[in-house]
Image: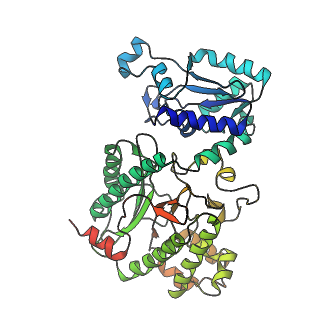
Amino acid sequence: MFSQEVYIARRATLKSNLKKGVLLFPGNGESGMNCKDNWYPFRQDSTFLYYTGINIPDVYFVIDVENDEEILFGNNPTPEEIVWIGAVTPLEELAAKAGIKTVRPLKELASYVKKAQQREAVHYLPPYRPATVIQVSQFLNIPVSEVEKKCSVPFIKAVVAQREIKEAIEVEQIHKAVNTTAAMHTYAMQNAVAGKTEKEIAGDLQAIAIGGGGNISFPIILTTNGQYLHNHATENKIKNGNLVLCDCGAETSMGYAGDMTRTFPSAARFTDLQKEVYNIVLYAHNSAIETLEPGVRFKDVHLLAASKLVEGLKGMGLMKGNTDEAVHAGAHTLFFQCGLGHMMGLDVHDMENLGEPYVGYTDSLKKSTVFGLKSLRLGKELQEGIVITVEPGIYFNPFLIDAWKAQNKYADFVNYAAVEKFKDFGGIRIEEDFLITKNGSKLLGNPLAKTVDDVEALKNAI
């Protein structure tokens, strides 16, 4: 946990922004993997962590804003339960570390919420676990089907406004997570060689994340089929000459995330063709980074990166026509189907559970619904203190190529005859993490090889 003062100050800011109502913070519970006592690794709700730092299951936190009352609801384990789980820190001690003065048994929560509803509004954030949806439904007497639509928009906006600006202590945690992430990538580049399976490498990477004190921040993407955006590791054996795409991240024991991608050859060197495509992605990546600063709309950075990809693909004879017109039409999405990046913090896709329209967009800048742009999680203006990823890519998806070729889609901009030869190429993505500073941006974590020469040198360093 951070110091007590951190959590007290965060809650004071939240209360000053909302001014009235009762705020309900459900903590996550244990979740059974294949029976109720065989649990998935526990992960606390990030907003609960942000305002309390309490990282144990089956607790609720409530703030009565007008009465300035804060209560932690939960149960200390019985002696019989301690037989299984071992000694734990008492709730009262955890509450004191967070600056919370009142602790009450969990069985009293339902009656407390019911009485609160009679005098003022009870605010809650969108629950993302089915068990939490049911609990909120029961506490507030709302049909399960209406729980999501009745969540509090003012509460969401207040939390987003706080959590998106990272404090120095948070940046330190993210820096730590990114360095562990970089260690994972270093291992992958040096060990993902012909004859090993994707899962074999992914398992080693997860061990590095756990050894760093936390765990992985999302399921590891380690694949020779990089043309599929979120293709997780399989039993597939790596072959000599394959491109390997590794998108992975570690999170610290306090829940702060890292998220990086490198694409590299399984052989000692890139082929000339692999190198050519790689350098197009790298140029788009570096061009996007150069524009990062407060006041810049990230949607525009995304479109800039798309234009750099188009220019490179035109140079290879895969695209044609006017670059700006091609991007405006969406022709680039044959090769770049996703967004350029996202915010990152206590969640690898920071606050995504609160809703992208509130997190990545504004009342005046709405999220697109068209293919490609609808996958851009962050579109709004950048601010000092925001942490983001930058991750352009080129993906030769044979199914998409076949479908769009049959429709003659974007024929004014795509040379399908030339693209046909790349259907077994795969995909390339490069991703790094940045803090937006007063006058630009700062790379988080220690630099990791990303030029062709540096990647090859790292691969061959052992």
Residue 439: image quadrant is: bottom right
Horizontal and vertical percent for residue 423? Answer: 49, 75
Horizontal and vertical percent for residue 137? Answer: 70, 28
Residue at the image position 62 percent from the left and 35 percent from the top? 12
Q: Quadrant of the C terminus?
A: bottom left
Q: Quadrant of the N terminus?
A: top left
Q: Residue extending furthest left?
A: 462
Q: Is residue 288 above or below residue 162?
A: below
Residue at the image position 47 percent from the left and 58 percent from the top? 231
Q: Nearer the viewer, residue 183 or 102?
A: 102
Residue 45: image quadrant is: top right
With 44 as the anchor, is 15 left or right in this view?
right
User: Number of numbered discs present?
Assistant: 0
Q: Is residue 202 above or below residue 110?
A: below
Residue 450: image quadrant is: bottom left
Q: Is residue 240 above or below residue 381?
A: below
Q: Nearer the viewer, residue 27 or 95?
A: 95
Horizontal and vertical percent for residue 380? Answer: 66, 60
With 251 as the anchor, is 166 left or right in this view?
right
Q: Nearer the viewer, residue 154 or 150?
A: 154
Q: For residue 458, say whether it is visible.
A: yes
Residue at the image position 69 percent from the left and 76 percent from the top? 328
- The colour style of the image is rainbow
Q: For residue 396, say whether it is visible.
A: no
Q: Residue extending furthest top?
A: 79
Horizontal and vertical percent for residue 184? Answer: 34, 55
